[in-house]
């Protein structure tokens, strides 16, 4: 586990495994995951994201905490020339993604790190990712846990470093405390610019941003999701 060299007091995820998996998902973990899995990078490792795929990709995108994988699988299926990397420590979520990958036959443009995203971010080259997603992350509602929220002072510099100039960072949540937190920290960060020009820009998803099961459950429960898009500003030439 990556906590061996990350600050264990800032673990950004909860449990690693949930209910027992059905036969097909167990078989996919054993049979499909090894061909898609990215080994957990160690300190000092460097990873060329394009080299993870068996054919050339127009771009490489990254989803941090993909949940059950519905958004990630949709992006892979609708952008066959884009390599989509996802990091998710919850093994049941990984199994859910694998089922969708198998159903959509997108094995060639999906790669998975079944662990903490931070070592992967640290191993990627500067300006190597064309789009990043952090959708419906754990809100860590207790104040003593706020520093564990992924979007914040520790990880925004990581994302800014690996994102290309002009790349999008997409954030979503149905927890208003987390929304305010993410907005405050990302707007304040010098490398990001919020694209919103009016309320509809954060109240509604754009066409290439599919709904997820979690989002649908949130709406059924009366919670209104917020969708935010930020652009990585151009680097200043030295």
Image: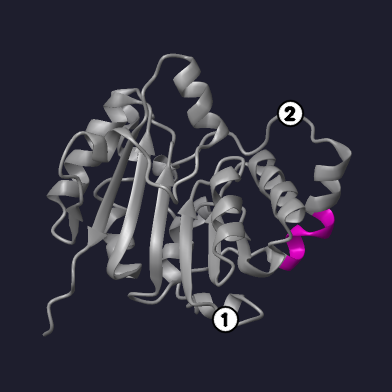
Q: For numbered disc 2, what is the local secondary structure?
A: loop
Q: Is residue 29 at all visible to an observer of this figure?
A: yes
In the image, residue 76 above or below residue 164? above
In this rendering, which labeled residue sits more in front, label 2 or label 1?
1
Q: Badge 2 is on which residue? A: 19
Q: Badge 1 is on which residue? A: 51
Q: For numbered disc 1, what is the local secondary structure?
A: helix
Q: Residues within 10 Å of mark 2 (few under 14, many from 20)?
A: few
Q: Residue at x 15, y 44 (%)?
A: 197
Q: Position of residue 11 (x, y in %)?
A: 45, 42
Q: Magenta includes 31?
A: yes
- Cα separation, mark 2 vs mark 1, equals 34 Å
Residue 183 relative to residue 24: left or right: left
Residue 136 relative to residue 53: left or right: left
**In front of the other: 54 or 212:** 212
Q: Position of residue 10 (x, y in %)?
A: 39, 42
| Residue range highlighted in magenta | 30-35
Q: Residue at x 62, y 76 (%)?
A: 53
């Amino acid at each position: 586990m990556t906590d061996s060299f990350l600050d264990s007091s800032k673990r950004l995820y909860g449990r690693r495994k949930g209910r027992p998996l059905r036969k097909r998902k167990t078989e996919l973990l054993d049979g499909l995951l090894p061909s898609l899995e990215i080994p957990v990078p160690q300190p000092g490792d460097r990873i060329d994201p394009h080299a993870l795929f068996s054919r050339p990709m127009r771009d490489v995108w990254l989803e941090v905490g993909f949940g059950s994988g519905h958004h990630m699988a949709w992006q892979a299926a609708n952008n066959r020339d884009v390599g989509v990397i996802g990091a998710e420590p919850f093994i049941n979520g990984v199994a859910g993604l694998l089922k969708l990958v198998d159903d959509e036959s997108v094995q060639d443009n999906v790669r998975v790190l079944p662990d903490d995203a931070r070592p992967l971010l640290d191993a990627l080259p500067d300006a190597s990712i064309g789009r990043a997603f952090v959708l419906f992350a754990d809100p860590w509602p207790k104040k003593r846990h706020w520093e564990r929220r992924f979007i914040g002072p520790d990880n925004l510099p990581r994302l800014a470093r690996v994102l290309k100039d002009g790349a999008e960072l997409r954030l979503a949540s149905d927890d208003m405390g987390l929304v305010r937190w993410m907005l405050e920290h990302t707007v304040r960060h010098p490398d990001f610019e919020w694209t919103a020009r009016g309320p509809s820009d954060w109240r509604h998803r754009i066409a290439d941003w599919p709904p997820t099961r979690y989002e649908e459950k949130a709406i059924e429960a009366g919670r209104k999701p917020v969708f935010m898009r930020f652009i990585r500003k151009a680097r200043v030439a030295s």
